[in-house]
Amino acid sequence: MDGPVHVFDIAGIPRLRQAWELVQELSYVPEDLDLHAFSRHLAQPQLVSARREIEALPDADRIAYELATCAQEQEAPRRAQAPLSRVQAKNGVVKMGPGMDRSRRKLLTDLLTEFFGESVLESGNYLYPPGGFKEWHTNMASVPGWRMYIIRKSAQGRSFFRYVDPVTTALQTRWDSDGQINIFEVRADQPFWHAIASVDAYRWSKGFVIPGNWRDAFGA
């Protein structure tokens, strides 16, 4: 599709059949995730407020916070913390890695590298249980380039990817479907504001940094 987000149905791409089967295999609820504790986590006032922000364009406070955070991370990149915290403190995102399914995740990355004909890197591996969300953000502190997210969603429930069109500044919402692929560009010179939320679904998101010639592989 035209615009900042390019959307595909993985079921319509035969060369990605094995990759999709692997994504489905890797989409489960971790045994060490306490869903009752997760619900209590989401009920914290600061998280309720952050989730509510997604219903409108990012406000001045969110923009200032994001830009300051990105600047700080570029000056002093974050280091991995041990032990791994499964749930992110400032939002409703559940981390599915690192440390989980390493060999199967590498196989998935290898399959995508073969599909694109160039190196692919994993950039995200997340679960959004019902009520889960990722606040407004831009990814400007990370490596610039194209991102691809493969979405696995439970049959019941709704979840969405929301973004601000960088040209029109209009708020856009794309409701997820199982097997949906979202592709967009992260640029240092043009913030791409986006957020994710699960209304009442289980949503898994497998993210990758993909080569700039990705259109060739998709025939787009």
Image (spheres, grey):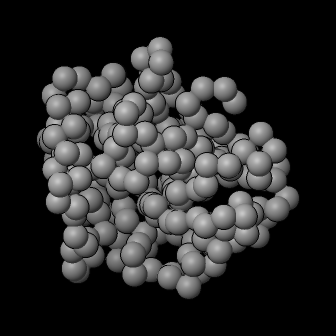
Looking at this view, is 118 or 10 the one in front?
118
The image shows residue 148 at horizontal and vertical percentages of 57, 51
Vertical arrangement, residue 16 with respect to residue 160, above or below: below
Q: Position of residue 210 (x, y in %)?
A: 58, 56
Say whether residue 97 is visible: yes
On the picture, is 127 further left or further right than 93? right
Position of residue 28 relative to residue 127, above or below, is below
Give coordinates of residue 124: x percent, y percent. Answer: 45, 60
Query: Is residue 83 positioned above or below 43 on the image?
Result: below
Residue drawn 22% across the image and 61% down it: 77
**Which image quarter: residue 52?**
top left
> Can residue 204 be seen from the camera position used here?
no
Left or right: 22 with respect to 190?
Answer: right
Question: Looking at the rendering, in which quadrant would you find the C terminus?
Answer: top right
Residue 218: horizontal and vertical position, in percent? 77, 48
**86 in relation to 49, above or below:** below
Q: Residue at x 59, y 44 (%)?
A: 183
Residue 36 sits in quarter: bottom left
